[in-house]
Amino acid sequence: MTENEVLLDVKDLKMHFPIGSKSMIGPHKNFIYAVDGVDFKIKKGETLGLVGESGCGKSTTARAVAQLYKPTAGEVILKGKDLTKLKANDLIAARKNMQMVFQDPYASLNPRMTSGDIIAEPMRIYQMKGILQMTKKEMDERVEQLMERVGLSRFFRNRYPHEFSGGQRQRIGIARALALRPELVLCDEPVSALDVSIQAQILNLFKDLQDEFGLTYLFIAHDLAVIQYISTRVAVMYLGTVAEISGSAELYKKPLHPYTQALLSAAPIPDPKIEKERKRIILTGDVPSPDKQRPGCPFYDRCWKHMDKCKDHKPRLREAAPGHEVACFLYHDPD
Amino acid sequence: MTEDVILQVKDLKTYFHVDEGIVKAVDGVSFNLRKGETLGIVGESGSGKSVTNLSVINMIPNPPGKIVGGEVLFMGKDLIKMPVSELRSIRGNKISMIFQDPMTSLNPFLRISTQMVETIVLHQGLDKKAAKEKAIEMLKLAGIPAPEKRIDQYPHQFSGGMRQRVMIAMGLSCNPEILIADEPTSALDVTIQAQILDLMKDLTARLGTAVILITHSLGVVAGMCDTLCVMYAGRVVERGLTSEIFAEPKHPYTQGLIKSVPRLDQASGDRLNSIRGQPPNVIDLPDCCPFYPRCDKAMDICKRKYPAATEYGNGRAVSCWLYTEAK
């Protein structure tokens, strides 16, 4: 297995949700274009950070990758297999390699199951399907081992979710995601609901687990500093498309897309000296609703550098520097 | 200096009586707010930030909560002992409040105009027409485009950021002395947060309003606040000028908090400096330093008694045995 092996390849992923009532005959007329043509690759062992504001399609992207939604179009290729074309049974087998950690540690754990059962559940399901051969004893051992690894005492295995704090519940969620020894973990805002001191503990845990098990993460957050800390590469999303994708250090040092620049300048830095002298790019207006497809650049209305050609032509991701792709006509001309 | 002080909170204690025991949500909080100043209160969830401010305007639901001790002096008068009728002329007028979630703090059944005019008529004695003009003027100041038209719309017709602008316009419409903002931007995206903070800073400076800003974000505090209170488990563990606290945090909790936030301007290091353990359960908390189980510098005395605040002048104070011993 080489270092540069591409583990996940997402090609032109689209996820459109029908809205409004359906007429008696014919297809839906109105859609929310939540994800509208997203491309990225994740190499083995790296962390791709997905950042953007609410409603930009980060979570929908992760869910469409996991096939929790059936994507409208596009390919999701995990280790050479296109998940969108697999039959139900093959999909279950393939998904063993890809697990999720969710944002809300309150809603994502079944309140009527003990923490031990929650962590064992993926193993039980795969054993029932005959994909995994494990005895009850092996499973128990694995649960205890996982709990200890994520920083929970094994004596907590008979406790219910409400007996744990938010940080501890997130640890249970992480243990459950690791139970099947996946290569890829999709983390959907796993630290957003946590207080800062706990957030730091969980971020450290994610990094340690990655080093230990060679995990690959797709890590979603809206906090730019968190993304910078955890990611090797970062994709910035806006209105269902990727605006810019690059190595983490490069993106934060030299953001190219006007939206990335505005986003970075809007994020506060916890240091009064720096905050006093910073110049902010204050964007006007709100993120537009994704209920129609635009012929031009999705950021056109709020961009302070927009040009005539941005209105009618949609910029595609193009390489502006080695490994640094940006969808903006400041850096390349329309096709 | 002291004559500038418009709000003085002295040893405020608010307890909640629940089945499991007594929750000391706020346990001996003291701070001063000067005219035109922005005071930040930071702390993690459950540290008592919001309860402190609800206590200031005496809006603690009773039962289960009760303000059991302390004074809140607003221009020399104790708000806690004040009769409700008099208090009503202060709430929303001299001291107004904006909340985290602008969807739940606006009445979804009423037009913006109805909600704004109500306050202005009540407190400023204007007639309805003049009050509506005043409301439109405030919305314009808050950066709402076409306020003459928007004022007759309902809350759901506004986006999250716009709703928070309406709240700010409403909060400032009676020209209050103090604006209490409880996590005003926590529900908003960063680019919208920047807009709203910018607006708050600009408007309150223009109107000379003092602000109490409650937040969990150290980044927001760094950009907005002149002075700062750091709260932990119902107590203020450290207070002082924001610049001084960030330059040289004294309390181990403040130090840990500042170090545990990942920063945009610093390349990602190997590990974040986290504080071990979890915030304590504040039910029936003994009289010890609530931070000692998580503190690297904990001593024997920390388990037995809560340290008194050590004053350093200029409003700086720390409640930690490390500094009490030295004195």
Image (tube, helix red, strand yellow):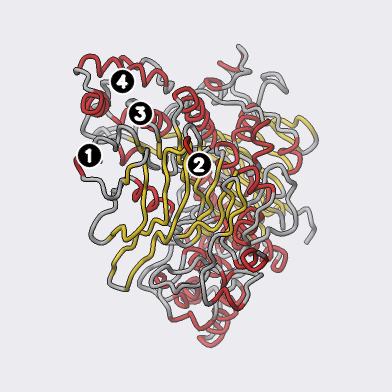
Label 4: state its secondary structure: helix
Q: Nearer the viewer, residue A136 or B298?
A: B298
Residue A30 lies, in percent from the top left, at 36, 30
Q: Which residue is mark 3?
A: B158
Q: Earlier in the sequence, mark 4 or mark 2?
A: 2
Residue highlighted by disc 2: B39
Report the number of discs: 4
Element carrying mark 1? helix
Chain ID, mark 3: B
Q: Which residue is mark 1?
A: B86
Between B108 and A235, which is closer to the camera in this rendering? Answer: B108
**First in sequence: mark 3 vs mark 2:** 2
Q: Amino acid at mark 2?
A: Leu
Amino acid identity at mark 3? Phe
Q: Quadrant of residue B227?
A: top right
Q: Is residue B288 above or below residue B232?
A: below
- The answer to whether residue B317 is left or right of residue B203 is right
Front position among marks 3 and 2:
2
B48 to the left or right of B87: right
Q: Nearer the viewer, mark 3 or mark 4?
A: 4
Q: Is residue B220 left or right of residue A30?
A: right
Find the distance from the CA under tag 3 to the CA under tag 4.
16 Å
Outermost residue to the top: A308
